[in-house]
Amino acid sequence: MTLKGVLSAIVTPFTPDGEQIDEAALRALVEQGIEDGVDGFVPAGGTGEFSVLSQAERMQLIEIVVDQTAGRASVLAHTGATSTREAVKLTQHAEKVGASAVMLATPYYEPIGFDEAWRYYAGVAEASSLPICAYNFPPATGLHLDVDFLVKLGREIPQVKYVKDSSANILQMHTLLADHRNDITFLNGEDVLMLPALTLQAPGMVMGVANFMAPGLARLQQASTAGDVKTISEIWLQITPLIVFLASGRYNSGVKAACELLGLSVGPVRAPIPQYTAGQKEQLKAILGQLDPSLLTRAANK
């Protein structure tokens, strides 16, 4: 299954105390995402709070999302870890339960360079037959996967077919889309670069806002494919205040707060990530109220 279109960086619903994954809520969120027009899901990613999940919980998430999609959407399971050993274990599990592909952030905390990163991806590729999406998010990992490295990955490790780029580096995005489409497929992972990515006809996006704004993102992706810059600009101008507001605070907390405001039960973020304050929720509610309702999840109208 080719990864393209709108991929939802799906949040991890928790019980009210934050102690357990709320399986019923997660299944309902997958169903709503499919109804809202997403092309795929990315469980256990950054927006899914993977850093505060146990290995067993990450596996549980992937199993539930794969089961609930039942082949109706792609599942790009995030299996990146601080060691190649753990990444291999998570990847092999994702393959066993039926994920479409895996996404791997490079190991964090202990600094590594390009040589170590290349061996990390090669080690996972050797242990599994799944397509691999490199995950470039240098603020979290400490390593920026630049154009040369990504092209090397795509050319030398055939399973590395995609990159989710959250570096906010517009020059890198332009270079990958203009000069290296045949080497590695660019998936935009940075909300603030949505306009140029769509204008350059990036084949897909991985977005946390897809949890509650998939209808709008689907319209944007369709307009991008059709070269309809007018529609892209009109929708982008309308959603920009929301994108800017979410970027100004704790992104995961904001996405979950928006979901709850729009009728999607997802529970709290897990400590130590801070919850949105009452004031932040009021500001967010006002911004959401200014948007065309057709851009937002259909759950808000139920």
Image: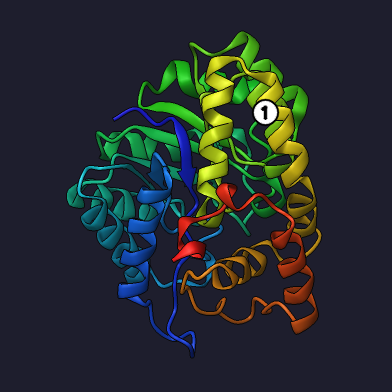
Quick one: 99 or 79, which is closer to the camera?
Answer: 99
Mark 1: amino acid: Ile
* Residue 54 figure quarter: bottom left
Quick check: 282 above or below 152?
below
Could you tell me residue 198's position as x and y percent? 64, 26
| Residue visible at 34% across and 34% down in the picture | 125
* Residue 187 figure quarter: top right
| Residue visible at 48% across and 88% down in the picture | 16
| Residue visible at 55% across and 79% down in the picture | 268
| Residue visible at 44% across and 43% down in the picture | 103
Could you tell me residue 298's position as x and y percent? 47, 56
Quick check: 172 above or below 44?
above
Q: Which residue is mark 1?
A: 232
Quick check: 139 above or below 287?
above
- Crowding at dot 1, Cα within 10 Å, few <14 / some 14-19 / many 20+, comes out as many
In the displayed structure image, the side of residue 36 where residue 272 appears, left or right: right
Q: Is residue 78 visible?
A: no
Could you tell me residue 156's position as x and y percent? 43, 18
Quick check: 278 above or below 113?
below
Quick one: 129 or 299, which is closer to the camera?
Answer: 299
Q: Is residue 132 visible?
A: yes
User: Which of the colour schemes (rainbow, by chain, secondary structure, one colour) is used?
Assistant: rainbow
Dot 1 lies on which element? helix
Could you tell me residue 291's position as x and y percent? 69, 52
Quick one: 211 or 80, which is closer to the camera?
Answer: 211
Name the quarter where the N terminus is drawn.
top left
In the displayed structure image, the side of residue 255 where residue 32 appears, left or right: left
